[in-house]
Amino acid sequence: MVDKFIQENQWFEVSPIEDCPHLASNFAFGAAEAVVSAFAKNKCRSCSDPSENWMCLRCFDIVCSRHVKAHGVEHFEETNHSIVVSFSDLSFWCYSCESYIKHPTLQPVYSNLHVAKFGSAPRTTGRVGHFKPEYIEEHFDTEEDFRNKANQLVQLIKDSKHCIVFTGAGISTSAGIPDYRGPQGVWTLKEKGEKPKKGVSMLAAFPTATHMSLVKLVDSGIVKYIVSQNVDGIHRKSGIKAEKLSELHGNTNLEICEKCGQEYLRDFHCNGQHEHYTGRQCSKLGCHGKLKDSIIHFGENLPTETLKKAYDHGNEADLCIVLGSSLTVSPASDIPRSTAKQGKLVIVNLQRTPLDHLATLKIHCQTDKLISHVMEGLGIPIPRFVIKRRILIGAKPNSKSKEPILFVYCFDENGLPASVLRAVEIQLPNSSPFSISSEPFLAHCPSDKVSLELCFMGHYGEPTLLLDSSLNVTRLYSVTYDPLGSGKWEIEQVSEVEQLPELLIASLESWK
């Protein structure tokens, strides 16, 4: 069903197209004047629903959206009139293109509708932030209202069979990362001609109480899935497993092979240049595809499989909790909307959102404050943030040389290769120490014993890790580091491994 829904709607565009070929034949004279009187009526011609309507720019009929009773779709199928304007968010849609559109021809319609809806003419500069001043203002519930709503949310979670959480930039502001559309948001300030305030580096930002609570709720099975618009990578860093997460707009620490789809986690920013290429290549044997960053910019398609999983869970959920999102970017915002059709929608945000009218609960407070109350109500402690690393150390016989090849290979809990080391210092018996400062961390090793000093990226002040290892077997070291704890690495487990990861084998076979 979701496959068909996505295929039919092609909801992957996050910005309008500018060259719609259907505009000339579907834009009638007088549309700019007609939209004012149509907005005053604002009732679907077929069902009289006033909640979410569009006006046809060719015949001026008022029709409801596909999120109500889809009379707009029926109107298009009957008349082939393609272009409509939304009374909700003042956007323009072409049914033939299956895309939002923009064009100077549409500006008079937009301006007149803006005056009719908000009582003032729109600013003429383009925006990516809020264009409605009332949406920028922040609101705070009274303490009594907050507690009542938070207690209601606790009960909704307890009653839920399939709860999902939808997260936005608001859950990372307490980590020092600015949001986008808040009063001091990046785009809000840019629209005012002001320079955005510099925040904490995403690489060094600590997961918040909200991030860590979600880890526990997912691990305990209370929350089934997380859909996130955030690119800061903190969900993965905090411990959310990849199969429980859709990062719709990408992850600054993730790059992907364009040829085979292999993913690579990096403890540095994967900022690609031309067409997202990072300059690195896939290390799979025989692939050598170019790697690209995973960030989705305005106007680019969202990853199909990631979006499909989000839609699947959105349609299955009986409860969707929105945390810190303005819900203004489509198609991401359509996922909470889909849950609201058959389940309950809870929105936690200081500002108004376009979906407030669909919410069972709207809570105006900081997400950390709410989640702390919710976790207390559920009787679940919030876990501490602990850095976990999995390091494979061993040696493999080398057919090209008498000396085996020493390897140090890191990967995450999902098996993805993880670039978390900046260097490896190696000390062999009766030899001078030497260093390897880039991946792959491989070296000829005439001895079956080695002393290693592993140097991490250090975004959280991680110290080096000293290991004395015997190379007669391959060992997997599972180590942890509490940035606010003892200040040293703890070896949680050491286990022997027989089967090497595919990417490590490829590196060993191609290394000279």
Image (cartoon, rainbow, N blue to C red):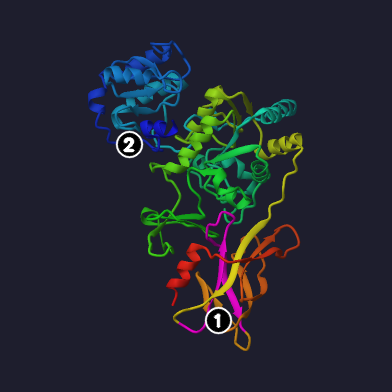
Provide the secondary structure element on which disc 2 rests. Answer: loop
Query: In the figure, residue 302 lies in which quadrant?
Result: top left
Instruction: Please say if 173 is above or below 425.
Output: above
Give the crowd class for mark 2: few <14, some 14-19, many >=20 residues within 10 Å.
some
Residue at 45%, 56% (x, y): give it.
262
Provide the secondary structure element on which disc 1 rests. Answer: loop
Residue at 63%, 74% (x, y): give it.
453
Instruction: Please say if 116 is above or below 415.
Output: above
Whichever of labels 1 and 2 marks the residue nearer the N terminus, that label is 2
Give the percent coordinates (x, y) of residue 257: 41, 56
Q: Give the residue at mark 1.
A: 445
Region in magenta: 401-428
Give the percent coordinates (x, y) of residue 412: 58, 57
**Residue kind at label 1, given as amino acid type:** Cys
Give the percent coordinates (x, y) of residue 450: 63, 79
Q: Quadrant of the N terminus?
A: top left
Q: Is residue 389 left or right of residue 70?
A: right
Residue at 72%, 51% (x, y): give it.
384
Q: CA distance from mark 1 to mark 2?
A: 58 Å
Q: Is residue 229 left or right of residue 19?
A: right
Taking the view exactly as shown, the residue that stands out farthest to the bottom is 430
Taking the view exactly as shown, the residue that stands out farthest to the front is 498
Q: Give the residue at mark 2.
A: 17
Query: In the figure, residue 157 lies in which quadrant?
Result: top right
